[in-house]
Image: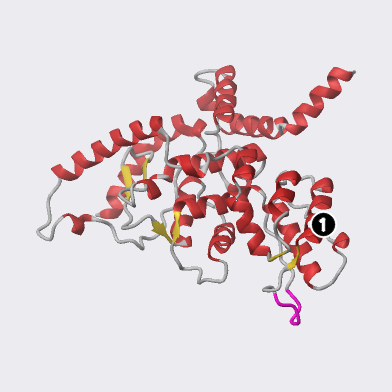
Amino acid sequence: LISVSYCLLFAAQRHVLTYMEDAVSQLLENREDISQYGIARFFTEYFNSVRQGTHILFREFSFVQATPHNRASFLRTFWRCFRTVGKNGGKYSSICCYPNYDVLTSFFPADLLTAQEYHCLLQLLCPDFPMELTQKAARIVLMDDAMDCLMSFSDFLFAFQIQFYYSEFLESVAAIYQDLLAGKNPNTVIVPTSSSGQHRQRQLPNDCSPLDGVEASLFYQCLESLCDRSKYSCPPSALVKEMLSSAQRLTFYGFLMALAKDQGINRALGALPDKGDLFLDPVMDQELEKLVAQVSGLSVSGPTSSSGDTANLPVRNSPRINSPWKPLHHRRKMDAESEGSNEETDSSEN
């Protein structure tokens, strides 16, 4: 009986049921293709992808944010795919192979991008990723600045990690902060029950100035109580206490910025490396350099322009392209359909 209870608890903590339901759903949706190589192989490949963190690629947002493991996997994938935005000063940001096996290379003139441009990168991995989350992450970096200001990749990445992984926690923190500003009892704050991470924030009263902030010790007491009763992911309370120990008063966005910059919280989350190692990934570097060499060879063999190489670069404000990607297990099905999609594209261009 004890062993059964332990197994059920382990399954709940690891969200095993979520992955089983998703696997069965994909199995039923693609049963004709899967029957060619067997159900056992399908489940093996599916759970290997879950373990490796590649199962979230090109999936819908509701699945990407469904579990803490999915969120950490998405953060790690976003970092590995687009870290060259900061490393190479904007030489190239990404190289993605589409179902038609065309190579898409996105060029940026600098390693500083706007919130809209970072959102376009996020949508390459998750086509329906909500702009609201991107804007909230950008607001942590920019605070009161205009939302169209430029941000470095590292600043945006660590802010995005906090906003995306701890989204429900931050919604409750915002409510607590506003109640403290208004002199209300924070114990009456209701923890969000929705997993969407998109909740309506309460407006500050007109007579409260957010520039004054709240008392740090009282703020931490409320956060500690929140972490004890919250069923969502929260940063370790001991690290939060240490982070706030030297402050007397703080603002909400000052707290979010401190969370984003704290390397202890980053290590506890475990999705991203330390800031000093953010651009180190030798294995990915080797693969990326191979693809860049291939793209360079294609561009050299193509027709040249009299105005120089810069004439061939795409315009910075390019329109968003909806990703045609399906889950990895749809690869066989997409291969069979690729010829038809090419014909439609050719006819539309003509």
Horizontal side of 81 relative to 345 (left or right) equals right
The picture quadrant where one finds residue 207 is: bottom right
Count of all numbered marks drawn on residues in the image: 1
The residue sitting at the front extreme is 246
Residue lying at 57% horizontally and 46% vertically, measured from the top left: 60
Q: Describe residue 17's horizontal placement relative to residue 94 as left or right.
A: right
The picture places residue 73, in percent across and down from the top left corner, at 57, 38
Q: How far from the left and from the top, in percent, is residue 80? A: 45, 40
Residue 278 position, x and y percent, is: 47, 42
* Residue lying at 33% horizontally and 45% vertically, measured from the top left: 104
Residue 191 seen: no
Is residue 220 left or right of 272 when viewed as pictured?
right
Find out whether residue 42 is within the magenta segment: no
Question: What span is colored magenta in the figure?
Answer: 204-209
Residue at x 68%, y 29% (from the top left corner)? 20
Q: In the rendered structure, which amino acid carries the disc numbered 1?
A: Cys
Main SS of the magenta part reads: loop
Packing grade of label 1 (10 A; few <14, some 14-19, many >=20) is some
Say which residue label 1 marks: 222
Residue nearest the viewer, comparing 222 with 12: 222
